[in-house]
Amino acid sequence: MSDAALVDRSAPPADVGRLRRRTRHRLWFVGVVLLGALVFLLVEGLGSSLNYFDTVAQALAHRATLGTSTFRLEGVVVPGSIRRTPTGADFSVAEGHLRVPVHSTGSPPQLFQSDIPVVVVGHFAHPGSSLFLSNQIMVKHSADYIAAHPRRVRAPNGTVR
């Protein structure tokens, strides 16, 4: 049987127009779904790649909401609070009069010391606790960062390292 025999040439032209419209509507629907999926992936990808952190005051204010989820905490290392441990270091970070004790595992960075701004990655021990369990310490030592964010944490003695 030939291909010509399979084509129904008796179909009225209105059916052909309806068929084309239905195909066009399906293509639009598929295009909108694909565009929506692409926008969703871009928003999720960019949102998760940004490095947000909470200051000591923000973290303490939202402690119940944060619970034991992992986040970045920014503060100044309290002078005299660093105690080296076999697994890392214990110290406190502060913002003004607010303090959070930190138990950190892993080797602190070489520039880690008292009275400098740091960002620690971790979580509160439990939702009601102020003890922060950290597995990473990041030392902020760029003058460009502080110039770009003058209201953020700065060493109490005014120095920037």
Image (spheres, rainbow, N blue to C red):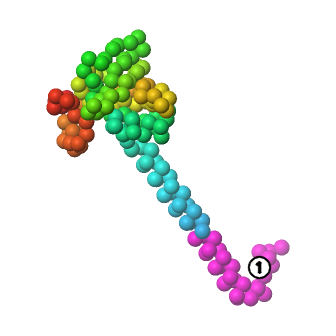
Q: Quadrant of the C terminus?
A: top left
- Viewer-nearest residue: 120 or 157: 157
Based on the picture, tell me whether residue 60 belongs to the magenta stretch: no
At x 37%, y 24%, the residue is 101
Location of residue 48 (image quadrant): top left
Q: Which residues are magenta?
A: 1-28
Q: Looking at this view, name the residue that lies furthest to the top.
A: 86
Label 1: few (<14), some (14–19) or many (≥20) C-alpha neighbours in 10 Å: few
Q: Quadrant of the N terminus?
A: bottom right
Count numbered badges in the picture: 1
Lateral position of residue 153 relative to residue 19, left or right: left
Q: Where is residue 123 drawn, in percent x and y?
A: 45, 31
Lateral position of residue 15 relative to residue 131, left or right: right
At x 34%, y 13%, the residue is 84
Q: Where is residue 156 drawn, in percent x and y?
A: 20, 30
Lateral position of residue 78 relative to residue 73, left or right: left
